[in-house]
Amino acid sequence: MRLILSLLLALSLPTFAQHNHGAMQPAAAQAAPLSDGTVKKIDKAAGEVVIQHGQLDSIGMPPMTMAFGVADKAWLNKLKPGDKIRFAAEMKGGNAIVSRYEMAK
Ligand SMILES: [Cu+2]
C-alpha cells in the first residue's frame, strides 16, 4: 500500500508542476510551437543565448535578435554561434527563456 501511494505521488508531481506553470502562461510550455532561430552568441556568464528569431506567437514577439535565458544551463555548452535551431520560448520571471529546442535539420 505504501508503495502504491509513493508511485501515485511520483506520477502526479510532473502534472502539478505543469499546471502551476500554466497559471502564468495560458499556452503550456509543452504546447508552445517550435520557432526557427539562429544562435548568434553564447554568454555563459549571463546564462544567456542570443538568438535571431522569427515570429514568436507564444510570447507575442515579432522577428528580432535578442538574448534568452535557458531552461537548462547545460544547453549553453552545446549551442554555438551559427547553429540553426527550432525552439520554444516562454516568459519566466519577466525574462524570455528557451524552454526547449532541437537542432534544425
Ligand atoms: Cu524577441
Image (tube, helix red, strand yellow):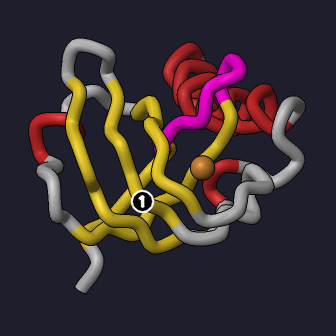
Whether 89 is among the magenta residues is: no
- The extreme front residue here reads 64
Q: Which residues are magenta?
A: 92-98
Give the x, y percent position of residue 76: 20, 35
Q: Is residue 60 left or right of residue 8?
A: right
Residue visible at 11% across and 36% down in the picture? 77
Q: Give whichever of 77, 62 is nearer the camera.
A: 62
Classify residue 23 by image quadrant: top right
- The extreme bottom residue here reads 105
Is the magenta region chiefly helix, strand or loop?
A: strand
Residue visible at 28% across and 78% down in the picture? 104
Label 1 Cα crowd, 10 Å radius (few <14 / some 14-19 / many 20+): some
For label 1, the SS is strand
Mark 1 is on which residue type?
Gln
Residue visible at 26% across and 71% down in the picture? 84
Whether 96 is among the magenta residues is: yes
